[in-house]
Amino acid sequence: MADTEGLLPSELIGRKRDGHELSEAQLRALIEGMLSGEVSEAQVAALLMAGVIKGFSVAEAKALTAILWESGETLDLSSLNGPTIDKHSTGGVGDGTTLLVAPLVAAAGGQMVKLSGRGLGHTGGTLDKLEAIPGFDVSLEPEQMLEIAEHVGCVVAAQTDRLVPADRTLYALRDLTGTVESTALIASSVMSKKLAAGASTIVLDVKAGDGAFMPDARQAEQLAELCVEIAQDAGRRCAALVTDMEQPLGRRIGNATEVAEAISLLSGSPRGRLAEVALELATLALSEARPRSGRRDAADDVRDDLVTRWERGEALERLEQMIATQGGDAEVCDDPSSILPSAPVQREVVATAGGTVSAMPARRIGEIVARLGAGRARKGDDIDPAVGVDLDVEVGDEIEAGQRLALVHARSAEDAQRAVQGLKSTIALGEATDRHPIHTRVLRG
Ligand code: URA
């Protein structure tokens, strides 16, 4: 056990309960003690609750990150040519940004080895989306990830069991004990995984608003600031964008339908909220990764270059290569509807009155889509890749009575009817409201 200055686990917990800061060695003794069985889960749960109530300091957040990160392997990306870039989103509804950012960064000469997660509750997950493509394999060994990145410039895979194993144990305990909601615990959990994934530049998309894990914009900014500081402290370049999750980001929600949306966007010019966030994240990542030119318009140059590559179809080409190399049917990029699974029942949601769309709460819409079968209530549940919702409108749009607001893709008529009713009562009409800005703040490391 690490040196605790002679204090027993119960005494360390008592110090946290009384609002004192614990040293890295003391936190290490408790977390590593839990992994080795010398400290009970009940004791660590008490520590976590004391920290959630009294607050963990920035130094404690950095110490926790190091303890988690060092519990497993780190990916070594040093053999890759070009800047290594990673991206993390705190999760949301219709958030298919990875499907756009990874190939876009690759098209511009970056290398993205992206370890992604699965959907849970009202939020979607990139692995579930990609697995909607027949044959697509997300279970890769680190050597395979490097080989694909070397040839394509991007690879998206599941996190291996060997990376940050302590986070899995600690996160499961937090989930059981109501101790997920702590900026320091979330930052250390997220950043330990990003640091272990090995990229030299990390770009973070911290969501704020109804469908976000952290709805309050100020708290989302604090989380973004802490994550950037942790990354910088570990010698990585890092920038964060705080983005709006009051309404779904993309127009499509569901696994196959989000893949189709990404392909459709990459086949044309960037347009709409999802493309804007993706473009901004890729711009931020590449301008952080490149040696500073000192020119104030460097980011504008990067963005212009990305738009040109997007419009020339270079990002779509990378996506196609990535899908083919990971065993998926790459024909999906030419003809998504014939390759992606489709649901047997389609139902329209039609406006009964005209007006201005004043709210489309992301969480509720995510829950409706999850209930159709696209999401999971519990980790490990099966999902249906074909079901989902295509939205025709967004907040601020003027609509007329009889206009289609959304299209539901369902497994049964009963499921479809329930989703149609749910969407009718969720999409609110009212006074014209200000559209929320898509992104509110950029924080640079
Ligand atoms: N996502 C993570 O990876 N960890 C957290 O603590 C919360 C969200």
Image: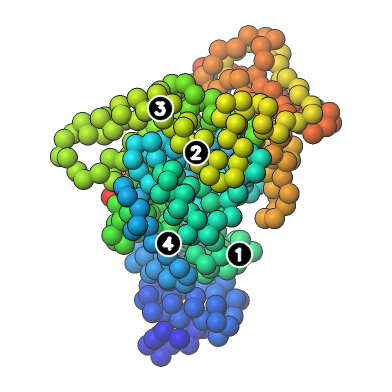
Q: Report which residue position mark 1 lands on.
A: 172
Residue denoted by label 4: 75
Q: Which mark is residue 35?
A: none
Q: Could you tell me if the residues under marks 3 and 4 are in contact, i.e. CB atoms within 8 Å? A: no
Left or right of 218, for residue 299: left
Q: CA distance from mark 1 to mark 2?
A: 36 Å
Amino acid carrying label 2: it is Gln
Q: Earlier in the sequence, mark 2 or mark 3?
A: 3
Which amino acid does the dot numbered 4 rest on? Leu
- Earlier along the polypeptide chain: callout 1 or callout 2? 1
- Disc 2 crowd rating (10 Å Cα; few below 14, some 14-19, many 20+) is many
Does the Cβ of the disc 2 residue fall within 8 Å of ligand 1? Answer: no
According to the picture, the residue beneath numbered tag 2 turns out to be 321
- Cα–Cα gap, marks 2 and 3: 15 Å
Q: Residue 251 location, x and y as percent? A: 57, 27
For the residue labelled by badge 2, is the local secondary structure a helix, a strand or a loop? helix
Could you tell me how far apart the alpha carbons at marks 4 and 2 are, in whole angstroms?
23 Å
